[in-house]
Image (tube, rainbow, N blue to C red):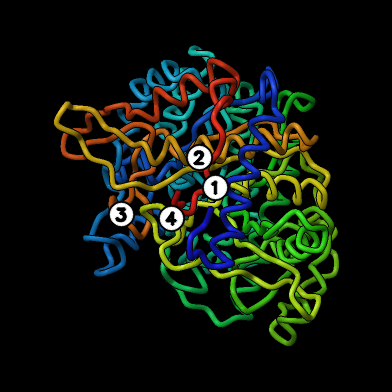
Amino acid sequence: MFLGASAGTMALARVAGAASKAGASKAGGAPFPKDFAWGVATAAYQVEGAAAEDGKGPSVWDVFCKKKGAIFDGNTGDVACDHYHRFKEDIALMKSLGVRSYRFSVSWPRVLPAGVGASNPKGLDFYSRLVDELLKNGIEPLCTIFHWDYPQALYKKGGWLNRDSAEWFAEYTTLLADKLSDRIKIWATQNEPQCFIGLALLDGVHAPGDKLKFPDYLTAAHNGMRAHAKAVQVLRARCKDAKGTKVGYALAAQIAQPASDKPEDVEAARTAIFSVTGRHEWNNAWWTDPVLFGKYPEDGVKNYGKDMPKFKPSDLDEMKQPLDYLGLNIYKADTYKRGVDGEPEQIPVPPGYPRSGADWQPITPGCMYWGPRYFFDRYKLPLSITENGLATRDQVFLDGKIHDPQRIDFMHRYLSELARAIQDGVPVTGYHAWSLLDNFEWADGYKQRFGLVYVDYQNQKRVPKDSFDWYKKVIATGGKSLLGKSAVPVAQLTP
């Protein structure tokens, strides 16, 4: 029983513990489909290094990292995990792990140093060799076209504020389709617009570090979604295997979970997850309704009022392009109940509630059930978990190994919830652990370690963690190894 626990703690524990137990038991035999795409994910700037090698142009992150105080301890992505030179070693690790899918991104300025115009053969050759090595090892490449490393040359021309940015992105996508679509069948246009627009251009904590006025921020967001749509059109027109190509869009999914299974709480969370409240980037519908429904959500339009950007009416028609799947990057959830006024009421995270090494991430496994369920109910698209992971302060132990029981417990709970969603009929096609490697975690530099593989940045030695072996077993058994344990709620219990 809970002893002296707050109502908030008990509500969070119910969704985190009891639901997880139900997910494992309901799954029965094999919790995941036979063709489930077990995978891992990385992003170019976070792992590649080689920041100025072989003709690569500078990105906004290359410039931002040189700004005093912008990055933890003055870290940069100049070398990162040196994946540019060590990708074969890293793919060998993936093969040992048994993954079927590798989600990676292309560095835009590596293949187009000026963002448009002349391409860089050496940069293109790197990705060609990467894809060939993946396929040789039986791993499906999932290519994210843009994961934040915007070309500095285009930023100087106005970046996402420039209406031409959609055409620039289309030109870049055309290059990738022409050079790589004979081997790459699964694409994601962009990763987490809330971050590369919101954190980067509104809050100023990510590259390029701007703090735009709200109307300009909304204009940049609008052009970013126009760019996504142009990329979808390019891929549909130019990919060499048009019928076999799958195109998606990856969202920094902001999940709401209900405080209980009461219908009124379930509906309160459903309302909350797609509401546009406040004047910030952290919502879902603003970034997803335009590209799937061809319209901005009404509550957001009302909320933003006179700050709404001016645009051609045809923009929204062009923005709406058919997608094959929606990518969800899921890390945590906020918890809601129906308030006394009938509106969703958020339950605050109680003092001392478990968190990851990153302060923004409370441990809320229910997000992997409710998030996919609500998103499928609204958008009716197959879903892929394009990121999910945990930051811990890993170290090499006296025995030379990296023991990360928190990550194993986290993945066990979250995957059990995902199994429950699948068993309840939500079409989830894959799961990509963030990340294969410890890497450059943006403004946090190398402070956070999200990897299944430990990276010693002094010598680039890779050491698989305990979680690597644990995940390997999950993949090999199709999730059966998750079964058999009853889930104790995340929040601390006393006898």
- Picture disc at residue 137: none
- The kind of secondary structure element at disc 4 is loop
Identity, as a three-letter code, of the amino acid under mark 1: Phe
Residue at the disc numbered 4:
354
Residue 445, numbered circle: 3
Foreground: disc 2 or disc 3: 3
Q: Above or below — where is 354 with respect to 173?
A: below
The span from disc 4 to disc 1 (Cα, nearest Å) is 33 Å
Q: Marks 1 and 3, Cα distance to the nearest angstrom?
A: 20 Å
Q: Which mark is residue 146?
A: 1
Disc 3 residue type?
Gly
Distance Cα–Cα, label 2 vs label 4: 31 Å
Does the CB distance between marks 2 and 1 fall below 8 Å? yes
Crowd tier of the residue under label 4, counting other residues whose Cα lies within 10 Å: few below 14, some 14–19, many 20 or above = some
> What's the amino acid at mark 2?
Ser
Quarter residue 82 falls in: top left
Q: Residue 447: horizontal and vertical position, in percent?
A: 28, 53
Between discs 2 and 3, the one toward the N terminus? 2
Q: Which residue is mark 2?
A: 105
**Which SS class for mark 2?**
strand
Q: Residue at x 39, y 56 (%)?
A: 358
Residue 143 appears in the picture as rendered: no
Question: x, y (%) of residue 377?
Answer: 82, 49
Mark 2 crowdedness (10 Å alpha carbons): few <14, some 14-19, many ≥20: many
Q: Is residue 151 above or below residue 413?
A: below
